[in-house]
Amino acid sequence: MRKLYYAAFAYMIAGVASGLFYREFTKLNDFPEGGSTQLGVAHTHLLTLGFVVLLIVLVLEKVFTLSASKLFTWFFWVYNAGVVATSAMLVWHGSLTVLGQESSKMIAGIAGAGHILLTAGMVLLFLALGTALRRSQPSGDGMPAAEIAGSAQG
């Protein structure tokens, strides 16, 4: 649970910092106000996909103990790799735009890979959540399946 808390906190800091960077970098380089650059969406990607989503997952972890599933560890690392790769490419591409330089297909390819990792991470999250829901599902006598398994052993 601490991992989720620290990761969400780090994304909150990164999201706020990227918003500050966007504002100051565009001013410093006399970029037209309201001009199109991906720097502005890096801020929202970090705050939404990093900070908000991981806070929601933290609540789900508290309620359903998602980390009991091996899939949860996979979700955590794959999803975070996706958020970092996607956001980094947004900052890189946006910075090039502000500087008046051409972007490359490599940046688009890495951003696409980041989005694929995000998608895979979400699938892993839902698989871990499904496992946790089945584990906590009451059986016919009203006891959760996990409690039934524990009481059968004791």
Image (cartoon, helix red, strand yellow):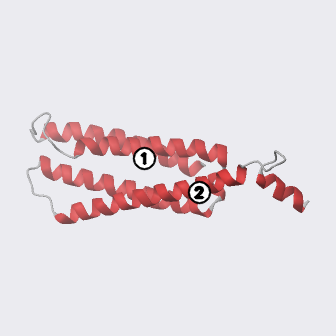
The x and y percentages for residue 40 are 24, 41
Q: Residue 50 carries which label?
A: 1
Q: Are marks 1 and 2 in contact (CB under 8 Å)?
A: no
The x and y percentages for residue 101 are 9, 55
Looking at the image, the residue that sits furthest to the right is 154
What's the residue at 64%, 57% (across, down)? Answer: 131
Mark 2 nearby-residue class (10 Å; few <14, some 14–19, many ≥20): many
In the image, 82: left or right of 149? Answer: left
What's the residue at 40%, 42% (across, down)? Answer: 48
From the image, state whether disc 1 or disc 2 is nearer to you: 2
In the image, is residue 116 above or below residue 42? below
Q: Which amino acid does label 1 sit on?
A: Gly
Q: Which of marks 1 and 2 is nearer the N terminus?
A: 1
Q: Which amino acid does label 2 sit on?
A: Ala
SS type, badge 2: helix
What's the residue at 27%, 56% (across, down)? Answer: 89
Q: Name the residue under label 2.
A: 128
**Marks 1 and 2, Cα distance to the nearest angstrom?**
19 Å
The x and y percentages for residue 93 are 20, 54
Looking at the image, the residue that sits furthest to the top is 33
What's the residue at 11%, 42% (across, down)? Answer: 29
Q: Of 148 and 111, which appears nearest the observer?
A: 148
The x and y percentages for residue 3 are 55, 51
SS type, badge 1: helix
